[in-house]
Image (cartoon, helix red, strand yellow):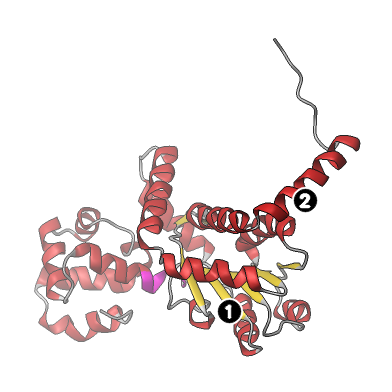
Amino acid sequence: MSNDILSVLQSKMPEFSKGQRRLAQYIIEFYDKAAFLTASRLGKAVGVSESTVVRFAVELGFDGYPSMQKAMQEMVVNRLTSVQRIEVANDRIGDQDIVSMVLQADMEKLRKTGETLDRNEFQAAVNAILKAKRVYILGVRSAAALANFLGYYLNYMFRNVHIVTASGAGEMFEQIVGVGAEDAVIAFSFPRYSSTTAKGAQYCRSTGATVIGVTDSRLSPLGQNCDHVLLAKSDMVSLVDSLVAPLSLVNALIVALAAKREKELGRTFNALEHIWEEYNVYEKQVDTL
C-alpha cells in the first residue's frame, strides 16, 4: 500500500465495523505514535483485541500487521519533530531495559543491512572511488560524523579528498562547485533527510560526477539522485539517529578500498610510522610485567 494510508482509512471509514472505526480514528489522530506500537499495544490503546488489529491490517490489503506497521513508519519517519521522536521513543521503551533494547535494535539493523545490501552496487561504488580524480564526501548534521570518519581514512589512500559537512546549501555549493565528470561523490542522508544533501547530490550528478548515496531507501530524497545506492538500516532512538549500520557499511567500504590500495598504503604508513615515532604522536607502550 502507498504512503497515503491515512487517506485510505478516511475513505473506508463508513465500511468499518465499530472496533475498526476506533482503530482507524486512533491511527489518523495519533499516527506518529501508532506507527511504532506492536499489534498488542495498539489494540490495548484502542480497546480492541490483538487479533482485531491483525485482521484490520489484512482487510486493508496488507499481508499482516508488520507490513501495515512498516507502511505507517515509512509515512511518518520523516515528519516527526524532535519532540515527537522523544514521545514516541518513550512509548516504545516503556519499562524495558534501555541498554538491552538499544543494543538488540542495533544488532537487528546490522543483520538486515547485511542481508539486503546489493553486493554489485557495493563493488560498483568501490570501483568508482578507485578511478576518481577527486573524491567528495557529503554529510551534514548527524551524518557529518559518517562523512568525517570515512574522510579520515580515505585521506590515507588518496591525495584529493574533500569532506563537505556544511549545513547550509549556499556553503555546500561553494565547496562542490568544482565537481566534474572525473570525480566521485559519496553522500550520506538518513531521516530526517537533509534537503541540503539531496540538492548537493543532484547538482554533482548534473556535472557528470558519479554519485554514491548511503541512505536507507532508494526512494529517499538522496536515493533518487544517485548513480549507486548503498542501503543501510537506520532508526531513531528517542531524538538520536542510530548510525550503527551505516557506520559498519562505511567500515566495509574502507576495508574494500584498502585491499585495492595495499601497496600505496604500505608506503604511506611506513613513512608515517617514522614521523609518529620522531614527533611522539602516540603514547609509547609501557611494559607493565
Q: Which mark is residue 198?
A: 1
Q: Is residue 124 shown above or below 205?
A: above
Q: Is residue 236 visible?
A: yes
Residue in the image at 53% along x and 77% along y: 222
Q: Secondary structure at mark 2?
A: helix
Judge whether residue 150 is colored magenta. no
Q: Which mark is residue 268?
A: 2
Q: Which quarter of the figure has residue 150? A: bottom right
147 relative to 39 in the view: left or right:
right
Q: Is residue 215 visible?
A: no
Span of residues in magenta: 74-78
Q: Secondary structure at mark 1?
A: helix
Judge whether residue 76 is colored magenta. yes
Can you give x and y, in whole percent of width and height, for residue 125 in the image? 54, 70
As drawn, which residue projects farthest toward the top? 289
Q: Main secondary structure of the magenta part?
A: helix
285 relative to 13 in the view: left or right:
right
Residue type, label 2: Thr
At label 1, counting other C-alpha atoms closer than 10 Å, the crowd grade (few under 14, some 14-19, many 20 or more) is: many
Can you give x and y, in whole percent of width and height, for residue 58 in the image? 13, 70
Numbered marks: total = 2
Can you give x and y, in whole percent of width and height, for residue 177 in the image? 76, 83
As drawn, which residue projects farthest toward the bottom? 206
Residue type, label 1: Ala
